[in-house]
């Protein structure tokens, strides 16, 4: 097991339970109204001139050298580094004890069993290292959206609170965020250099933490290159069929593969339902974005774009031709990975986090020859471009009632928590006390029986360092292949319209898009004609779509597009 597998397990689980799946792995900085949304007085966003004044300086960490360094990409993005094993001699990334003996309550979501705080060696070890008493209060992640509103309504917020972006819609967050401390005076510009590990957080992650022209959040589990997803294929099957994946450049090439690979008698279909991962191929805004600015400067919804209709028609054609697995067309998404592992589907869509050593283990259990790989960035027009999602979709906040000295103490603690992978501090934060909570095996930390009961993702949800590509012993090649793909992908990285602007849509539009989602599904599955989509679009416009366009036009005119 990779030392990162354990600390990421909770995150993978909560993405599944939250219904966000792999698409959310890369993050979401747009706060579209959803569920029982609460009204906000404004969009909550920030213009470019303000942004440049607020953003902290970026000073990359040089404490440790990865086996595969990051590769620089376009528009300031870069690929994720790789450590093939945990460094044999962890370095110290901080000096002294960060805390001053303060006591603070900290609430984070947890998707899993909540450990007891009584006689918890892990909590005791981390708090001793921090020089403060952080009373961790992990709460049920599945019901976190119900736990948070009463805390805000009753002004009973803890000192330190983590909130995922998908739990902000029913908080009226453009207003609610003002209950937290503005961290700009402590972190903006060169001020962050007082906290070197926080200074090593990429600029894009900090951009995701800004609302109303102020830096409120600390980012957790962010990325330096947040692709919303990728198109994956079974490399072992391609090799057997003599297919060169590097020759696949367009939807027409994919369609030819559909015919070549589909063999119902053998129980094999070329495609799963990867429509949601075609956004970059056809050049329409994919989740979490639904709006863009066209060449004329007009704000348009993806549903109005010819490119979106082209993608619907293309996928419907594949479905009607019999190239898409019947179970995928029946909506059995939860079985999609198993179909891919067993070779019943040869090409699928998934988040980049789906490409891992644990995936290789599951795939090889279903089929010993299993090898996953990803296509390079495809494009219908021969001009590849990979829109980036916001770097982070999870943030922690400090209570606005804390004094300046308390905020500084918490930021010193955050600097310790943000110590890089490979450091002594990272081991403490993620694994606790050696020989009690964990032991070293094959150069990697492994939780003991006691540690598996006590150690949970908690401190990590307050702030994290840049997380490298997980490496599972015995599956090092998976990490190498992923790194090579990502290094190529970031060459085509672009910022889509309204990138990372933390826009809170008006509550009345919370359910506006669902009919379009539903009819899009029916059309691409071949159950309804494209005329049904056209009719639904007319209704969408008259039911609020035109008004929401005016909202985004106003955002664009006042705050820009985030690009």
Image (cartoon, rainbow, N blue to C red):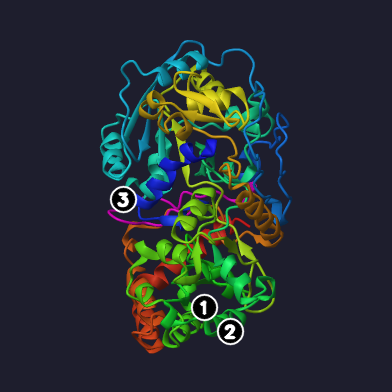
On whether residue 42 falls in the magenta region, the answer is yes
Q: In 3D space, how far apart are the residues under numbered discs 1 and 3 (Cα atoms)?
A: 30 Å
Residue at the extreme front of the image, as rendered: 368
Quick one: 272 or 474, which is closer to the camera? 474
For label 2, the crowd category at 10 Å Cα-Cα, with few meaning under 14, some 14 to 19 and many 20 or more, is few
Which residue carries the number 1 mark?
305
Left or right of 154 on screen, residue 388:
right
Number of labels in the image equals 3
Residue in view at x 42 percent, y 83 percent: 265
Regarding mark 3 in the picture, which secondary structure is present there? loop
Left or right of 27 on screen, residue 471:
right
Disc on the earlier residue, 2 or 3:
3
Q: Which mark is residue 38?
A: 3
Residue 390 percent coordinates (x, y): 55, 52
For label 1, the crowd category at 10 Å Cα-Cα, with few meaning under 14, some 14 to 19 and many 20 or more, is some
Read off the magenta span.
29-49
On whether residue 515 falls in the magenta region, the answer is no
């Amino acid at each position: 097991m990779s030392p990162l597998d354990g600390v990421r397990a909770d995150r993978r689980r909560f993405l599944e339970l939250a219904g966000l799946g792999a698409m959310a792995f890369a993050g979401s900085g747009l706060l579209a109204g959803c569920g029982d949304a609460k009204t906000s007085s404004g969009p909550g966003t920030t213009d470019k001139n303000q942004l440049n004044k607020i953003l902290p300086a970026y000073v990359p960490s040089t404490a440790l050298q990865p086996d595969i360094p990051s590769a620089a990409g376009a528009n300031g993005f870069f690929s994720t580094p790789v450590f093939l094993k945990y460094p044999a001699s962890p370095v110290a990334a901080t000096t002294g004890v960060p805390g001053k003996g303060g006591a603070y309550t900290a609430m984070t979501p947890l998707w899993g069993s909540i450990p007891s705080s009584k006689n918890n060696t892990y909590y005791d070890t981390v708090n001793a290292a921090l020089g403060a008493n952080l009373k961790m209060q992990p709460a049920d992640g599945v019901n976190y959206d119900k736990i948070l509103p009463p805390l805000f309504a009753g002004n009973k917020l803890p000192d330190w609170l983590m909130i995922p972006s998908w739990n902000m819609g029913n908080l009226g967050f453009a207003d609610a965020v003002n209950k937290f401390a503005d961290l700009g005076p402590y972190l903006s510009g060169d001020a962050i250099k007082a906290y070197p590990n926080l200074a090593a957080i990429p600029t894009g992650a900090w951009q995701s933490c800004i609302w109303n022209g102020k830096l409120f959040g600390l980012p957790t589990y962010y990325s330096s290159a947040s692709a919303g997803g990728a198109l994956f294929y079974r490399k072992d099957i391609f090799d057997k069929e003599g297919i060169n994946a590097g020759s696949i450049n367009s939807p027409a090439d994919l369609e030819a593969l559909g015919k070549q690979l589909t063999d119902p008698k053998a129980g094999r279909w070329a495609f799963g339902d990867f429509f949601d991962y075609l956004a970059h191929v056809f050049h329409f805004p994919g989740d979490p974005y639904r709006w863009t600015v066209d060449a004329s400067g007009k704000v348009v919804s993806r549903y109005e774009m010819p490119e979106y209709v082209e993608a619907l028609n293309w996928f419907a054609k594949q479905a009607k031709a019999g190239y898409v697995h019947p179970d995928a067309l029946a909506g059995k998404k939860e079985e999609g990975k198993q179909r891919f592992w067993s070779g019943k589907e040869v090409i699928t869509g998934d988040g980049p986090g789906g490409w891992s050593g644990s995936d290789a283990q599951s795939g090889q259990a279903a089929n010993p020859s299993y090898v996953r790989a990803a296509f390079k960035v495809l494009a219908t027009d021969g001009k590849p471009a990979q829109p980036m999602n916001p770097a982070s979709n999870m943030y922690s906040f400090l209570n606005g009632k804390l004094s300046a000295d308390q905020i500084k103490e918490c930021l010193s603690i955050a600097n310790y928590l943000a110590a890089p992978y490979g450091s002594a501090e990272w081991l403490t934060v993620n694994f606790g006390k050696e020989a009690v909570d964990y032991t070293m095996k094959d150069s990697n930390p492994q939780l003991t029986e006691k540690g598996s009961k006590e150690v949970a993702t908690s401190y990590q949800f307050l702030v994290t360092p840049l997380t490298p590509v997980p490496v599972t012993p015995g599956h090092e090649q998976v990490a190498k292949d992923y790194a090579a793909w990502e290094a190529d992908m970031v060459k085509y990285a672009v910022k889509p319209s309204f990138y990372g602007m933390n826009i809170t849509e008006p509550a009345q539009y919370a359910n506006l898009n669902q009919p379009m989602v539903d009819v899009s599904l029916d059309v691409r599955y071949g159950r309804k004609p494209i005329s049904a989509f056209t009719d639904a679009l007319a209704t969408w416009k008259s039911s609020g779509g035109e008004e929401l366009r005016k909202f985004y036009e106003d955002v664009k005119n006042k705050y820009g597009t985030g690009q």
